[in-house]
Amino acid sequence: MPARHARALILGSGPAGYTAAIYAARAMLKPLLIQGIQPGGQLTITTDVENYPGFAKVIQGPWLMEEMKAQAEHVGTEVVSDTITEVRLKDRPIWLKGDSGTEYTCDALIICTGAQAKWLNLPSEEKFKGFGVSACATCDGFFYRNKKVLVIGGGNTAVEEALFLTNFANEVVVVHRRNEFKAERILQDRLFKHPKIKVQWDTVLEDVLGTDDPRGVTGARLKNVKTGAVEDVAADGIFVAIGHKPATELFEGQLPFKPGGYLITEPRSTATAIEGVYAAGDVTDDVYRQAVTAAGMGCMAALEAERWLHVRGEVRHAAE
Ligand code: NAP
């Protein structure tokens, strides 16, 4: 069984992971970064990024992540294409096992596994996933040229997905359970002005309607939460954009979680309940959840890990 050891090991390849890697590499920790199931993280499934500082022109999410990766490698990070499936955080050294069969050990671990799209958990949603139901407009929008689509949700993701879908679809209806959006004002203004977009307030998706052969979406059963009225509407595609959940299943029973499954860190720190284990980015952040805040937390985690390794090294040295 192949085995690798690193002083600092980073799990995840979003803005938090790559920033942690840049700082850890520059601290001469020779970090290993395990990319995980979605190399580059959530920014690889977005298009325009307008709020990452340093770029006056609109940049593309996948491009930004390629640049972060290149920078991390340039300063000495080894990026490994593997997904961790098992961890023993209390072992010393910390022990992890990858999908590839490789076992990893490390002295300090920085968890940056991010978050993934949430689903409504309707049986009909499950049935039509990949057949007209999607959680990624940038991945699947192209299939809806001149068609009608629904977007479920009222946050930044829903509004951005709706705007993006206007590049293809001829009608986009945003279905939101309340009568106001959570999304940033600038995005809301763009959405309200867009001639292809309509909003259906106070409404939830009750069921996805479709055919079995060929499998495909034909519409949706919507319910007005104020009046209770139910209606069936025609649609070719349904995009679910109701938020994200942190990727923390791997740490269940080993680290404490906040409500919603986010990892708990100490106040004003990225330290978790286990010494030498740090968490940064969307996996722990239930408040800000921005690329730039994730990057900032990645930096904090690497600085804290470096300090901890240094102090631990000195204590060991003194004891020997
Ligand atoms: P979010 O801000 O948590 O919004 C989720 C939306 O889905 C809310 O409007 C919520 O309704 C609705 N919702 C949740 N569960 C639902 C359910 N079961 N049925 C129907 N509707 C449901 O999630 P997000 O839009 O994915 O954004 C996540 C984070 O990423 C945010 O911090 C956001 O600012 C950030 N983000 C930023 C950008 C950007 O800066 N350009 C882009 C994308 C995401 P309620 O409003 O009633 O709660």
Image: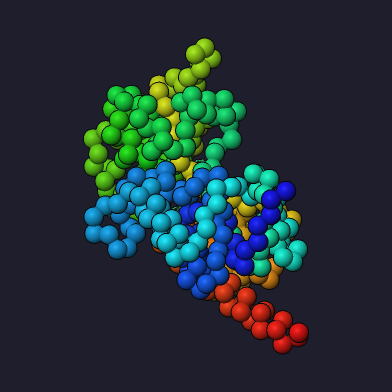
Q: Is residue 40 above or below residue 314?
A: above
Query: Which residue is most to the top?
Result: 213
The residue nearer to you, when weighing 229 against 185, is 185
Residue 13: % across, % down? 50, 54
Q: Is residue 256 left or right of residue 125?
A: right
- Compared across the picture, whether 82 is left or right of 26 comes to right
Q: How is the image coloured?
A: rainbow
Q: Position of residue 154 (x, y in %)?
A: 42, 45
Quadrant location of the C terminus? bottom right
Write the residue at 23% across / 55% down. Answer: 57
Residue 45 in view: yes
> Residue 31's quadrant in the figure?
bottom right
Instruction: Please tell me which residue is depicted at 52% across the width and 25% down the height of the picture.
Output: 128
Q: Is residue 308 above or below residue 298?
A: below
Quarter of the image holding residue 54? Answer: bottom left
Q: 59 or 76: nearer the eye?
A: 76
Q: Residue lying farthest front? A: 2
Coordinates of residue 44 in the picture (x, y in percent): 42, 46
State the image coordinates of residue 189 (x, y, percent, origin top left). 27, 48
The vertical placement of 75 against 316, above or below, is above
Q: Residue at x 49, y 24 (%)?
A: 131
Residue visible at 50% across and 61% down in the picture: 77
Q: Is residue 196 above or below residue 92?
A: above
| Res. 287 in view | no
